[in-house]
Image (cartoon, rainbow, N blue to C red):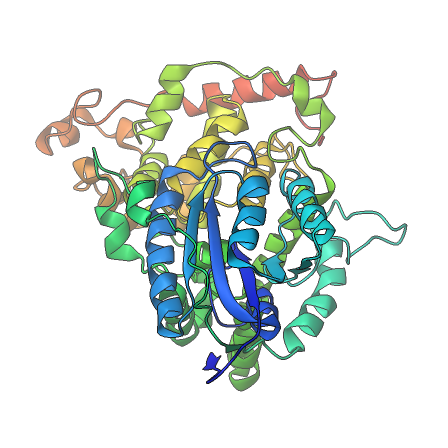
Amino acid sequence: MVEARRTDDRPPALIWLRDDLRLDDNPALAAAAADGRLAALYVLDDSGKSGRPLGGAARWWLHNSLTSLRAQLEEIGVPLILKRGTPVVIVPQVVEDLGATSVHWTRRYYGWSKPMDASIKQSLIARGIKVESHKGSVLTEPWEIKTGSGGAFKVFTPFKRAAIPSCDAWASLAASIPKVTGFSGNTVASETLADWNLRPKEPDWSAGLADLWTPGEVGAAAKLNAFLANGIAGYKENRNVPSLIGTSRLSPHLRFGEISIRRVWNAVRAKMASTPEIKEHGETFLSELVWREFSTQLVYHFEDFPDQSWKPNFRSFPWISDSRALKAWQKGRTGYPIVDAGMRELYATGWMHNRVRMIVGSFLVKHLLQDWRHGEAWFWDTLVDADIANNAAGWQWVAGSGADAAPFFRIFNPMTQAETFDPKGQYVRHWVPEIARLPNSLIHRPFDAPAPILQSLGITLGETYPRPIIDHATGRARALEALTSIKGMSAGESV
């Protein structure tokens, strides 16, 4: 709820929106509204000078999210100023043009964002402007949870044990409900979303995204309500079944801050209290939210984490440069149905089931020996929930190069993974229709199908569906051999 003031002669206050595109429970927005008549600013910096430019799927999401937010702000008389360029230049200029006396924003925790924000803050304070940053995208600040020796956690389980009381404490605080008066004084020129060309044109691949997603605060609330009503009861098991909608699908809404992490945490806690039988499912879901916190503190304390293997051993790993293999993986043409299904789902919907993300990631870095950064870059461009911390942490976990990561020698067998989590082939049949008529026993192993069966179904390996790009046993053996080459490690050792 947002309450509008009737009269107000206070000076303008600015909220600089970033990854917090919401009105509800937005501490930065509430504080700015308490300071003065509110104006909002969003800066699109796609130059790469102040962080990594958004990928294509995230740009599509941003267009729709800002469209939704602008409509909400217009209802309460708050102008949304859109500017493209470098924040270090634009934010002070907008403050001057507005005559604003205070500026507020929600903190970000990446290596490039910290010095940029500090520079802007110092320049504004020097001009007598009140500047405040706020906690709003996490439950725990990265510097709040420390080991016994005062350092950063490098292992998830003890981090979770230490973090959950802090998560509950922050979530228990009252959500911020602002009383807002919109600023209607000095006119500040705003660009338009049409100017930014965020949506794809040729080809327009976004049809599947529009069918699946409703970016914005209203869509986020609907996703949470649907999950609480229909998804959380079986979450612990169903989250591993790619043919089911067994996860919350809140990740893109959280990534763009369209719903507060506090609202989600509290809603799940309340559901667990009212429905005791879903307690273990709720605990599993909350653990996933804590993994998000863990990923954020990793990129805060280890600033090159998104771009550099965290474990020094892996910086000399003998990755193979093979553009043909990488392209086959990107296009879902590897000859392994579960891998191809995941990659096609990703391109069509901007999202991929979490279990399948692990399978396709393992296949890329272990079977194909491609540098995990190639996978991270592809996900960055194609995921609507692409987040610097979560994306890098997920890929480094799969590759074995990250903090508390799966050992490299633990190589997923794509066939047994598929047979375990998609036993009837429902997921594969949906995304790989050219082999959909194969029986359950062969749907994940078309290369093992007898020639008469393939012929009767009109399947020609190498033509209608690709042969495996690499034999599983060969790929596994090659990966383990590569592992032994880094600093004399054996195939059974963890790094």
- Residue displayed at 60% across by 58% down: 106
On the picture, is 146 further left or further right than 116?
Answer: right
Where does the image place residue 250, in percent across and percent down from the top left?
44, 60
Which quadrant holds residue 66?
Answer: bottom left
On the picture, is 482 further left or further right than 454?
Answer: right
Where does the image place residue 294, in percent across and percent down from the top left?
66, 51
- Residue displayed at 77% across by 48% down: 153
On the picture, is 419 further left or further right than 431?
Answer: right
Q: Is residue 414 above or below residue 326?
A: below
Which quadrant holds residue 359?
Answer: top left
Where does the image place residue 72, in percent across and percent down from the top left?
37, 69
Residue reaching furthest right? 149
State the residue in front, 298 or 452: 298
Q: Is residue 318 above or below residue 445?
A: above
Q: Does residue 432 show up? A: yes
Q: Is residue 323 above or below residue 25?
A: above
Q: Does residue 18 show up? A: no
Where does the image place residue 316, in percent across and percent down from the top left?
66, 17
- Residue displayed at 24% across by 48% down: 208
- Residue displayed at 30% across by 40% down: 197
State the residue in front, 90 or 286: 90
Total residue callouts: 0
Q: Quadrant of the C terminus?
A: top right
Which quadrant holds residue 229?
Answer: bottom left
